[in-house]
Amino acid sequence: MAAFVVAVCYFAFYKTRGISRQFYNKVTTIISRDPQLIEPFGVAVKEGQIYISDGESGTIMRFDAEGKLGVFAENLHTPSAIAFDKMGNLIVADSGSHTIKKIDASGAVSTVAGTEGRPGDVDGEALSAKFNAPIGIAVSADGTIAVADTYNDKIKLIRDGQVITLAGSTRGFADGAAAKFDTPCGVVFWNDGRILVADTENRRLRVIEGDGRVWTLAGSTEVGHDDGLLTEASFIRPTAIAIGNNAEIYIADNDSVRAVRGRNFPYVETISGTRRGFIDGVPHLAAFNRVSGLAVDGHQNLIAADSDNGAVRKFLTDEKNDPKAERKSAATPEKTDPAEFRVRQPPRWPYEPPATKRDIAGTLGEIRGEIVDENSQAWFHNGLDIAGGYGERTYFVRGEKVLHPAAVENFGTSRELIRMPSLGYIHIRLSRDKDDNLFAGSQFKFEFDADLKPVNMRIPRGVKFEAGDVIGTLNAMNHLHLIAGPGGDEMNALDALIFPGITDSIVPVIEKVTFFDENWLAIETNTTDKRTKLAGKTRIVVRAHDRMDGNSERRRLGVYRLGYQVLREDKTAAAETKWNISFDRNPDSDAVKFVYAKGSKSGATGETVFNYIVTNHIDGGQFSEDFLDVKLLVNGTYILRVFAADFFGNIATTDIFFEVTQ
């Protein structure tokens, strides 16, 4: 009943402002993996031109009406959200320098507020004030600048040369005059001077009245993509907001785009797909990878900065009004090249000494969880597990800048992690030892309880780490889970990184080969003459595992590639070898049950079993079901040769005779 009353109040609020529904019929890509644009974050539109901030390179790019991309301004630190003022100046939240910048029409950059390179939380005279990696920015019609002072958890105003705190205090959640926010990343002026806030880690949309009082517009305690009435909807991580020409509200929410717009009542609905990826076309099937910025152009098209795809995308109201969008469209971005990735850092292990070989405890593509039936929860292991000792220090293997606004997750759990742009590090006590003593001089920003015990932490956007800088210490998992590649494009770390001294002379082991028919009924293999009789479509399941030099006898690693070939009885080829399963890249999450058959299981403890369905095709994001169709063979005796290969070229084979009688 309470939710209904709130919805009625919001409905009355919206009815006075004419909110309606804008429909989009297509998503297209206008910029994709251009070498000039690495991490598109903020977007703004002026006179038919699109301006994009690049947090990695410290530039503002301009995409002109002719479809040409060029540098508009440079030499910023880590620019985030951008917005134009009434004079045509571009206002920038430069997170890495802790300042608010202004860029005039010529591209000249000046500081509006903040102290260069000095984070803090100080109001007052603009050029003496201090921010802490501000991410969100908005400009009102009268020139007032609203700032999401992200890691101070406050919303501030810049007006008449002064900085004041409008709302917010310590990190948390509270409405009213003593409001609290948690890592707010997006702001926009809305409805008679109110400010709408993307309260990122509270997963809500908040409203600040002119007197500083705060109320919650949408979102709940749940985390998800649930659409519905404002108080019933859930968000993942709202980061940016844009207001449409019909008063609808658009929200960049992790890997999707959401909207608040009118039905019978104001309603949160997802206008894109919700799966991470890179897909154009029908909006509700379109896939994104960390949407960070939104803007509406003069045709009511919605522009989205698709950060981890390195792309700028557009929701079209009518594709005919934007012919250059088709001309510039790219269906998918180029995948990261492992060879290019390898040269970005010197060879090293994530421990000291950096050249000392370590034990590999898990490889890309291994199953995690267990498959018992069609409802079983299982997933792919998306990195390389490198064994170490409890409490041992770990180190960055590459110099990188923090770009994700919430780069730290799962604090205090076994899956505590930090996600850098191209590498991820999991199972670590970040910047502290096994007893939770903090490392000195840390750029990690901790929060403490009443007993001064660390209970949470963040790393602001724009912080830079170098290869060899300490990350933290191993937790009770006793290994570092190292992810190679940006989110959604995870590569096999054995290919993408160089680990000094690593060797593998051990051939994989094929434990068992089993046949099933099209309906997953087992085919008898223990016949009198030891030859299996096959007819029709057949599935081949191979139980196999690998080890590497230095592994204990009990270690079971996943296999890198698997396939099979059909030979005639005289061992001449009846068909080409089919290397159907490859783990060069992490497969699509939906492919787990295309790779692994019933009985497959692996985890931190217990037995490890890899039952690979080698008749299916799996290679990165592509996967499909297939069979050995013996109807394509003439009657007779054949040999099925099964292959299991590791990354270093060691190949195991097993031959099984079978007869075709049809």
Image: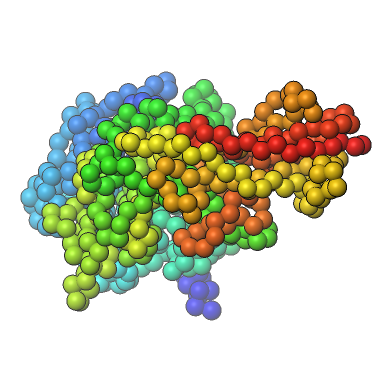
Q: Is residue 584 visible?
A: no
The residue located at (74%, 31%) in the rendering is: 566
**Above or below for 119 versus 5:** above
In the rendered structure, the answer to whether residue 645 lies left or right of residue 466 reads right
The residue located at (75%, 46%) in the rendering is: 515
In the rendered structure, the answer to whether residue 589 lies left or right of residue 139 reads right
Residue that extends furthest to the right in the rendered view of this protein: 662
Compare residues 133 and 355 and report the one nearer the observer: 355
Q: Is residue 368 visible?
A: yes
Q: Quadrant of the C terminus?
A: top right
- Residue 97 lies, in percent from the top left, at 17, 43
Compare residues 36 and 316 and report the one nearer the observer: 36
In the rendered structure, the answer to whether residue 425 lies left or right of residue 91 reads right
Residue that extends furthest to the front in the rendered view of this protein: 529
The residue located at (30%, 60%) in the rendering is: 390
Would you identify the image quadrant in which residue 600 lies? bottom right
Total count of labels: 0
- Residue 617 lies, in percent from the top left, at 65, 37
Residue that extends furthest to the bottom in the rendered view of this protein: 1
The residue located at (70%, 39%) in the rendering is: 615
Compare residues 573 and 156 and report the one nearer the observer: 573
- Residue 505 lies, in percent from the top left, at 46, 36
**Above or below for 269 versus 294:** below
Would you identify the image quadrant in which residue 564 lies? top right
- Residue 314 lies, in percent from the top left, at 48, 36
Would you identify the image quadrant in which residue 576 lies? top right
**Above or below for 205 versus 308:** below
Q: How is the image coloured?
A: rainbow
